[in-house]
């Protein structure tokens, strides 16, 4: 009997997400799954899309996000991601997850990246996941549980010190519970003050909770500048001691005196990969973005303010210009602006490219969805890798670029039947024009949709088409190995 599908995409260039060579063919979808790939000439469908000259690939997996709240925000909140072809986001990064902790006042930076106390209402990951499931979302959500969040709860907000044994035990119990309720891993942000006082032993002790579930350890490392190699060693040690895979977030070599050191860091990570599971993500820009930390600002690195609670009108302006206007130095200006966020030009383009090119890398936007004037990575990451770094600069071929956005991420995070375009896999798909796909978001004008992304499906349902959201919310909570 002839195959009958809900949807057939015909005559497309198929990138299957494995990194294997592209081929021409058709893709058939029924319900939430891909039911046929290749020549589906004998099959019919309720809807047929003629995709001659276009590319079809697994939906992109954003390996590093702070979308914990955005996935709950309702219409428009995920347009920044679906318009890039993203179908799955990894939330809870950098030690910051929206559960399990309630806040009665504005949490300290960087936890306030996710919002003030009104957003921190989840006593458990189970509560969060239930809310997400009942509200629905355009994208699938894969969640990590953050050490900074666990510390806020277990230490009663008194987080600028090492945790005591009873507090460590409390965090371990809460992490275990969250993993049982559908969380997939444990993240730290050891760079940040509310996490920096945690010793390596504290991280290992809390992370023991991962062992039973096989979840992974993901980290914004203690230091990405002078001590970046020591931080990588610490990360590897934590993974070996707990006995789980490790993942380094937004790998970089920060600050001018460390430019070029990615040759060292990648050699270190590459050598370790022979002995233990290790991976990393990277975003395609030589500038980072996080909360503004006055003690870290330096004269030679440009800083743009992305938001400020006391001075919202300063969003989008250079810190140096603000300081000049106020007749103060950079640090004093930064202190006046906080709580605030910033973009900092702290990387070398050559390092960014070397890190992206490395076979262990995957792509993560690290976009900050609630910033007034966000870093352009929020809207531009995936089309930028495809358009600028692949098509124009030839950093790698399209097969490799897509693998880093799909199959590689799914494999490392243990997302079953996702990240690959094959029969039986979930129909998370992106249809795009490989000749035109490109980001439009810039540092000056960051809220800009990309071009060349034509249609996006999550679990077989279109979420983005003809330049807009469809309003459908077929996303699910995705758990490691399930
Ligand atoms: Cu982050
Ligand atoms: Zn981070």
Image: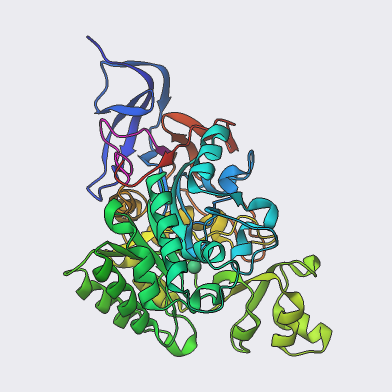
**Residue 127, x across and y down, in percent:** 53, 42
- In the picture, the quarter occupied by the C terminus is top left
80 with respect to 34 (left or right): right
**Residue 405, x across and y down, in percent:** 37, 52
Q: Residue furthest right?
A: 326
Q: Evaluate whether residue 245 shows in this view.
A: yes
For image coordinates 33% across by 73% down, the residue present is 235
Q: Quadrant of residue 459?
A: top left
For image coordinates 38% across by 84% down, the residue present is 260
User: 30 or 401, which lies in front?
Assistant: 30
User: 200 or 90, which lies in front?
Assistant: 200
Above or below residue 278? Residue 41 is: above
Examine the structure image and report whether residue 124 is included in the region drawn in magenta.
no
User: 187 or 35, which lies in front?
Assistant: 187
Q: Main secondary structure of the magenta part?
A: loop
Q: Quadrant of residue 300?
A: bottom right
Q: Count numbered badges in the picture.
A: 0
Examine the structure image and report whether residue 419 is included in the region drawn in magenta.
yes
**Residue 224, x across and y down, in percent:** 44, 79
- In the picture, the quarter occupied by the N terminus is top left
Q: Evaluate whether residue 387 shows in this view.
A: no
Q: Residue furthest top?
A: 1
Q: Quadrant of residue 243?
A: bottom left
What are the residue bounds of the magenta stretch? 415-430
Above or below residue 185? Residue 234 is: below
Q: Residue furthest front?
A: 166
412 with respect to 141 (left or right): left
User: 54 or 219, which lies in front?
Assistant: 219
Q: Colour scheme of this structure image?
A: rainbow
């Amino acid at each position: 009997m002839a195959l009958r599908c809900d949807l057939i995409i015909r005559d497309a260039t198929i990138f299957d997400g494995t990194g294997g060579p592209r081929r021409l063919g058709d893709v058939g979808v029924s319900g939430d799954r891909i039911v046929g790939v290749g020549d589906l000439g004998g099959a019919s469908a309720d809807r047929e899309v003629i995709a001659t000259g276009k590319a079809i690939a697994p939906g992109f997996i954003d390996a590093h996000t702070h979308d914990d709240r955005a996935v709950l925000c309702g219409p428009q909140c995920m347009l920044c991601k679906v318009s890039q072809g993203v179908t799955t986001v990894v939330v809870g990064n950098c030690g910051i997850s929206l559960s399990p902790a309630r806040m009665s006042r504005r949490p300290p930076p960087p936890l306030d990246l996710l919002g003030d106390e009104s957003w921190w209402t989840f006593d458990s990951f189970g509560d969060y996941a239930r809310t997400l499931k009942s509200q629905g979302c355009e994208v699938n959500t894969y969640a990590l549980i953050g050490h900074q969040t666990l510390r806020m709860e277990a230490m009663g907000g008194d987080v600028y010190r090492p945790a005591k044994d009873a507090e460590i035990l409390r965090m371990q119990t809460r992490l275990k519970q969250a993993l049982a309720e559908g969380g997939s891993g444990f993240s730290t942000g050891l760079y940040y003050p509310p996490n920096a006082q945690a010793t390596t032993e504290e991280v290992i002790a809390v992370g023991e909770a991962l062992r039973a579930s096989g979840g992974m350890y993901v980290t914004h490392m203690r230091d990405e500048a002078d001590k970046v190699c020591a931080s990588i060693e610490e990360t590897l040690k934590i993974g070996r001691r707990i006995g789980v895979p490790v993942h380094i977030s937004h790998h970089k070599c920060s600050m001018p005196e460390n430019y070029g050191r990615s040759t060292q860091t990648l050699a270190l990570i590459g050598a370790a990969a022979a002995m233990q599971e290790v991976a990393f993500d990277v975003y395609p820009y030589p500038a980072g973005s996080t909360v503004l930390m006055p003690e870290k600002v330096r004269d030679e690195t440009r800083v743009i303010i992305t938001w400020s609670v006391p001075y919202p009108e300063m969003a989008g302006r250079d810190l140096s210009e603000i300081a000049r206007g106020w007749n103060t130095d950079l640090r004093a200006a930064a202190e006046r602006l906080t709580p605030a966020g910033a973009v900092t030009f702290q990387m070398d383009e050559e390092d960014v490219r070397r890190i992206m090119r490395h076979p262990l890398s995957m792509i993560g936007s690290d976009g900050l969805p609630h910033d007034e004037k966000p870093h352009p990575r929020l809207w531009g990451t995936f089309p930028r890798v495809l358009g600028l770094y692949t098509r124009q600069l030839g950093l790698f071929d399209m097969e490799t670029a897509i693998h880093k956005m799909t199959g590689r991420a799914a494999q490392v995070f243990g997302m079953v039947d996702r990240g690959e375009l094959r029969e039986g896999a979930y129909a998370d798909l992106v249809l795009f024009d490989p000749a035109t796909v490109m980001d439009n978001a810039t540092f000056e004008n960051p809220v800009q949709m990309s071009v060349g992304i034509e249609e996006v499906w999550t679990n077989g349902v279109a979420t983005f088409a003809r330049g807009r959201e469809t309003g459908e919310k077929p996303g699910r909570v995705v758990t490691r190995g399930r």
